[in-house]
Amino acid sequence: MKDLHDIPQLMDELGRRARDAAAELAYAAPEAKARALTVAADTLWDRRAEVVEANAKDLEFGREKGLSDAMTDRLRLDEERIASICESLRTIAAQDDPVGATIAEWDRPTGLHIRRVRTPLGVVGVIYESRPNVTADAGALCLKSGNAVILRGGSESFHSSAAIHDCLVQGLREAGLPEAAIQLVPTRDRAAVSHMLGMTDTIDVIVPRGGKGLVGLVQREARVPVFAHLEGIVHIYLDAAADPVKALDVVLNAKTRRTGICGAAECLLIHRDAWDTIGQGVVRALIDSGVEVRGDATIAAIEGTIGAGADDWGREYLDMIIAAKVVDDIDGAISHIRSYGSGHTDCIVTEDDAAASRFFERLDSAILMRNASTQFADGGEFGMGAEIGIATGKMHARGPVGAEQLTSFKYIVEGDGTVRR
């Protein structure tokens, strides 16, 4: 490895090594990739005490930096969370390999047989903040999809990410795959991020995972294509036909289970006909659970709430705070979400099939839910094993980005001495 202080040279070398590794991974045997991930999971579990020790250094660094409670929660690793990372690695290993899979095939009157098959993107760059589990998730998904990856973790997770990365490299080594398939930028220097964003010769796509500041920076400055979501401004709408038990369970879980994830509910919309019954009960339950409710004039009349300001609509709190508003009908809810949503995840709680259909048809968020907690907005919960992120754009990948979404396609055209007339 070159001088860590010479960022352009360092990053260019990582890029060259990744490009070479990607060429080999494009035809790597599915069994080798699966073995690499299984060995990585076993190694991570065997070394869990070392990983927790490394994480303790990061937590101390985070405290000195004044990390918020939500960011600290994202950073923290314990044995239970490490077990979850290992399970994700094994789940991804066991999935069908997407590379080379036939998406569609057809015959032409000319005698040609045409197949559209999945192919890797090439080299993926992942820039993330305080969540060290992204090291494993991104590394595993890129490997499974035949892509090399350059990981640039946040300064807060520097030691944890390095410890997890070592386990991934051990898996690659034992499976006979190039160790440069999964590389971790070995410096906290922010200049590495700026350089990555311009590596058009070696990186095919950038995936940022983090707060609005990081994602906005990447989207503004990247010359490499980006899969990203800027914010998770997640809404839950309680319809007039909402079941009271489902409404209470879904809203409380969506807001309070983990406030610092992008699928956490940030705004509650309540049909006026449900306000005096279900709505008031849900708001009081949120208050009793320690949530600060910032409501419109109707909701703010309840003791324990506060009035919402103009900047509370369309805001990602990532904290025990929720905005709340009474709307006249489902179209009022849809209009509010169109105005203030981020296209990430939105949910309706209703027993009315027609209302659910209207909600699904007239909103275009990457994920739309009915009667389910928005905390399920996660690739692992979708059966992908993990996710490299949630994409809210409309080109290529959308929603949870798993191994399949990290592929493109090519056409295989076969004839039999066929010529065009």
Image (spheres, rainbow, N blue to C red):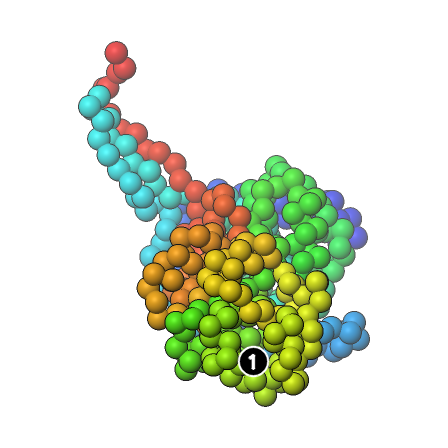
Q: Please report the residue visible at 64 percent of the width from the left and 70 percent of the height from the top.
A: 296
Residue 419 shown left or right of residue 346 in the figure: left
Q: Residue furthest top?
A: 421
Residue type at mark 1: give it: Val
Question: Where residue 148 sits: x, y (%)?
Answer: 52, 50
Question: How many residues crowd mark 1 within 10 Å: few (<14), some (14–19), many (20+)?
Answer: many
Question: Where residue 398 sits: x, y (%)?
Answer: 47, 51
Q: Please report the residue visible at 63 percent of the width from the left and 61 percent of the height from the top.
A: 314
Tag 1 residue = 283
Which residue is nearer to you in this view: 61 or 327? 327
Is the C terminus in the top left, top right, bottom left or bottom right quadrant? top left
- State the image quarter where residue 211 is shown: bottom right
Residue 403 shown left or right of residue 216 in the figure: left
Q: Please report the residue visible at 61 percent of the width from the left and 41 percent of the height from the top.
A: 224
Q: Is residue 129 above or below residue 279?
A: above
Which residue is nearer to you in this view: 253 or 409? 253
Q: Is residue 371 above or below residue 401?
A: below
